[in-house]
Amino acid sequence: MTGRFTGKTAVVTGSGRRAGLGEAIARRLAAEGAAVVISDIGASLDAATPDAMIGATAEMEAIAAEIRADGGQASTCVCDVRDFAAAQALAKHAVDTHGSLDIWVNNAGIGYIMKPLLEVTPDDWRAVIDVNLTGSFFGLRAAAEIMVAQGRGGRIVNIASQAAKSGFPHAQAYTSSKHGLVGLARSAAIELGPHAITVNNVCPNHVTTGLGAWQNEYFAKVVGAASVEDYLKAMADRIPLKRPGLPEDTAKAVAFLCSDEAAYITAESLNVSGGEEPH
């Protein structure tokens, strides 16, 4: 790795779960020299945050310990992104622990509340919007406050989705929340541009993380596939590059957008979909 993030500090929300996008992003940034803050909700707080779908405190600590064992810099900080004060505390932790805040990745999200439209409850809707869209705004707002005060620019990246550009059945709130991130990045980029802070989205297609495995099971049944393997084969067949995404694909795109090479790129929503989402 190049060390292109040496001397910089990166916060990655939703990075405390094994084999997730957040972990891959944090490891990539750390491998390139950034001090990273591994952050997740830490423990189930309500029905919207079940133990099986969140990064527990012990898991967060283990990921950070492995990064340090590999020669990187890492700390942990529990954060419920639905709470603006918690997002501000996370940003403060980065500065207090590592000396600055230069990169903020809004990765925390709910992608496991999927139902037919007529079965979606108001609580279902709020749960997804509160984490995916409002939580990303809170993170962006907390990061921007510090980045502006530091006066050294910064990078804010939201992990959106192919669902930021296309509609999907059984994913009304999810699709709406990800579409909302496109507008959030476009608007915030205008105001933060004069401070040399870029705001972009990365839009991966399906990635078989822990959450992705649950989605495979769910949508294989929805489409009537004979098996999960058949469902995944049909998915690969419609992707020009003939495979679903990997966590590393998203991590590489994030690292690029956080680098000096992307200093003149802002307000964009970058597809990382193997050609499946060409818009």
Image: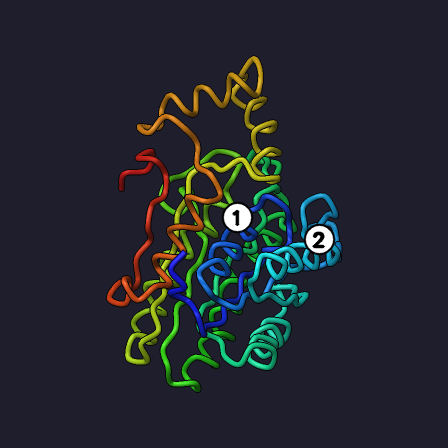
Which is nearer the eye, 115 or 43? 43
- The span from disc 2 to disc 1 (Cα, nearest Å) is 14 Å
Identify the residue at horizontal 31%, vertical 28% (top origin): 240
Q: Position of residue 26 (x, y in %)?
A: 53, 57
Disc nearer the start of the sequence (2/1): 1
User: Considering only vertical position in the picture, is 18 above or below 4?
Assistant: above
Residue occupying the point 43% across, 25% down: 235
Q: Position of residue 174 (x, y in %)?
A: 51, 46
On residue 21, the disc is 1
**Where is the C terminus found, in terms of image quarters?**
top left
Instruction: Please identify the residue farthest to the top as the structure is shown.
Output: 226
Tell me the element at label 1: helix
Q: Amino acid at mark 1?
A: Leu
Structural crowding at the residue carrying mark 2, measured as other residues with C-alpha within 10 Å and reported as few (<14), some (14–19) or many (≥20): some
Do the residues bearing badges 2 and 1 touch, measured as CB atoms within 8 Å?
no
- Residue 162, horizontal then vertical, whole percent: 40, 42
Q: At which x and y percent is residue 36?
A: 54, 65
Q: Which amino acid type corresponds to the residue marked 2 in the rendered image?
A: Glu
Q: Against 183, is 122 above or below?
A: above
Answer few, some or many: residues within 10 Å of disc 1's Cα (few below 14, many 20 plus, some between 14 and 19): many
Q: Quadrant of the N terminus?
A: bottom left
Q: Secondary structure at mark 2?
A: helix
Residue placed under numbered mark 2 in the picture? 59
